[in-house]
Image (tube, rainbow, N blue to C red):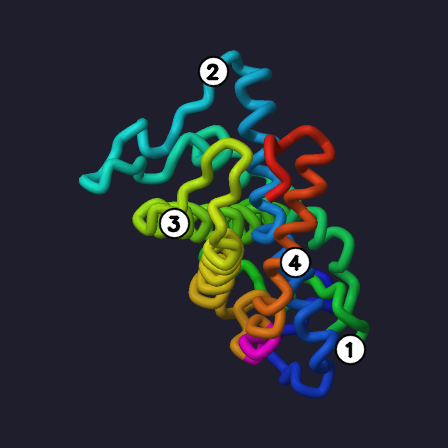
Amino acid sequence: MPSLFLSSNPSLESSISIWSGPLLVLWLYLPGYLANTAAMLGGKWIPQLTGIEPKAIDGGRRLGDGFRILGDGKTWNGLIGAIIGAGLLCILTHSLSENHLVENGIFLDPLIWAGPGDWFWIGGEWGAAFIVGAFLGLGCMIGDCTGSFVKRRMGKKREGDESSEAPLLDTLPFAICTFVVGLFLFPNTLVGNMELIPSMFGLLIITPIIHRLTNMFGYWLGLKEVPY
C-alpha cells in the first residue's frame, strides 16, 4: 500500500464541517447512490447483450393483498447491473483519490485505513475497491426493494405514468441500507467510520432531491419510462 494510506483512524472532527461532511459521505458512498442508475443500464443492456429477457425478482408472485411482492421494475438484470456498476465506480473513485489525505478535502479514498488484513482485501487494492463498491450497490438494491415492498403493501404501487406518491419510500430506504452496509461491513475503512454518521443524516435530508435529479437524467437519456 502507498504510504499515504493511513494505518490508524485519526479523528475526522477537525477536517469536516456541516457542509463538507455530507459531501464527503456522498463521495464515499457514490457507488451506492448511483447503483440505481447502474440498475437502469443493466436492465436495458444485459438483455440486449445476452438476449436474455428481464426476469422479475419476485417471479410475478403476489401476496394475500393482491399486489405483487416487488413488481416488474425490480429485475435480476438490474440487480446484477447495480452490483457490477457500483463495484466499477468504486474502483474509479479509489483511482481518482488514492493520493488524497484527510486534510485535503472531500474527495478522499474509500480504502483509507484498509489493508491486506481486511476480509474484503481480495485481488489487491483494486479487487478490494470493487468488493466495497459491489456491497454498497447491493445495499442500495436491498433498500430499494424494501421501499418497493412497503409501497405495495400500502397500495402505493406505481401505475404507468402515475407516481406512487411516496417519494420518501422511493429514496430514503436505499440510502439508509447503503449506509448500514458500509458501517457494518467496512468498519476499518473511511467508508465505515462512525464519525461520519451525523454527516450521513445531513445527506439523507437532501437525498430525495439527488434521487429525483438522477431519475430525471435517466428519463432524459431514455433509460427510464418516467422521470421519478
Check whether the beta carbons of the residues at disc 1 and disc 4 lie within 8 A of each other. Answer: no
Residue, x 50% and y 33% (percent of image)?
Answer: 78
Alpha carbon of mark 1 to alpha carbon of mark 4: how far? 28 Å
State which region is magenta: 195-199
User: In the image, which disc is placed on residue 103?
Assistant: 1
Residue at left offset 55%, top offset 34%: 161
Residue that sits furthest to the left in the current view = 64
53 lies left or right of 201: left
Which label sits on residue 205? none
210 lies above or below 40: below
Q: Amino acid at mark 3?
A: Lys
Question: Is residue 73 shown left or right of residue 101?
Answer: left
Looking at the image, which is closer to me, 179 or 55?
55
Q: What residue is disc 3 on?
A: 151
Report which residue position mark 4 lands on: 209
Q: Amino acid at mark 2?
A: Ile
Dot 3 alpha-carbon crowd within 10 angstroms: few under 14, some 14 to 19, many 20 or more: many
Q: Where, by quadrant of the figure, is residue 10 drawn?
A: bottom right
| Helix, strand or loop at mark 1 | helix
Q: Quadrant of residue 24?
A: bottom right
Mark nearest the camera among 4 and 2 is 4
| View extreme (front): residue | 162
**Helix, strand or loop for disc 4:** helix
The alpha-carbon separation of the residues under discs 4 and 2 comes to 34 Å
Q: Position of residue 44 (x, y in %)?
A: 58, 25
Q: CA distance from mark 1 to mark 3?
A: 42 Å
Q: Secondary structure at mark 2?
A: loop
Name the N-terminal-most of marks 4 and 2.
2
With respect to residue 101, does 44 lie above or below?
above
What x and y, as percent, mark residue 8?
Answer: 60, 77
The amino acid pointed to by label 4 is Ile
